[in-house]
Image (tube, rainbow, N blue to C red):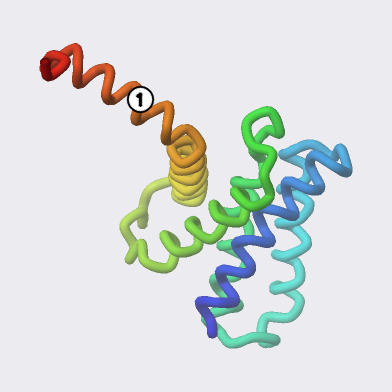
Amino acid sequence: MNTFILIITGILGATLTYFVSEHLRLGAVKASALLSLIVGLFFYAFPNLLNGYLSEHLPIVFVGTSFIGMVSSKTLKSYTLLAIAGSLFTAIYITKNHVFDGYGGALGALAFIALLTTMGFAFVVSNSTKIKHKVVLVWQRVFGSGE
């Protein structure tokens, strides 16, 4: 159940930040900072509302996924892709097993990895026929046309 709640938090962090940034015209940095401050203050004021694991990790996941929501609308316009990136961030965060301990910018790096992976996957899926055609052309140039 904790994992499910963290994934929902990851989805909300990315999509709410994007919504506040783009639709309420607050800007990416202000949107991320405002929403992260609200979540942080909530868990500071009510530390025992949820179990200890969630009280510790929910604010971290929200802040990290709010970095994903800071993406420009020129780069990414799909709430579905934002939700996928938020879920991917959360999955990496849960399973990272302290890989990034001691390094600054771990949340930003995880957000970058999740967003870039999601955008790359979406690009490959949407352009799969073009990519296949180009691979065939390269194959023919390298190995001949097979005649």
Assign a secondary structure to mark 1: helix
**What residue sits 43% from the left and 68% below the top?**
94
Above or below: residue 17 compared with residue 44? above
Residue 64 at what x, y percent from top left?
A: 57, 54
Q: Which residue is mark 1?
A: 133
Above or below: residue 31 compared with residue 73? below
Which residue sits furthest right? 24
Quadrant (top left/top right/bottom left/bottom right) for the C terminus: top left
Task: Please say whether residue 38 is visible from this viewpoint.
Answer: yes
Q: Nearer the viewer, residue 125 or 23?
A: 125
Q: Nearer the viewer, residue 111 or 23?
A: 23
- 36 left or right of 1? right
Crowd band around label 1 with a 10 angstrom C-alpha radius: few (<14), some (14–19), many (20+): few
- 55 left or right of 39? left
For the image, the number of numbered tags is 1
- 122 left or right of 81? left
Above or below: residue 23 compared with residue 50? above
- 96 left or right of 47? left
Residue 79 at what x, y percent from top left?
A: 68, 50
Residue 75 at what x, y percent from top left?
A: 63, 31
**What residue sits 68% from the left and 33% below the top?**
72
Residue 68 at what x, y percent from top left?
A: 60, 46
**What residue sits 16% from the left and 15% below the top?**
145
Q: Nearer the viewer, residue 122 or 139?
A: 139
Quadrant (top left/top right/bottom left/bottom right) for the N terminus: bottom right
Locate residue 138: give its quadrant: top left
**What residue sits 77% from the left and 46% below the top?**
31
Above or below: residue 26 compared with residue 145? below
Task: Please say whether residue 112 is visible from this viewpoint.
Answer: no
Q: Amino acid at mark 1?
A: His
Locate residue 42: give its quadrant: bottom right
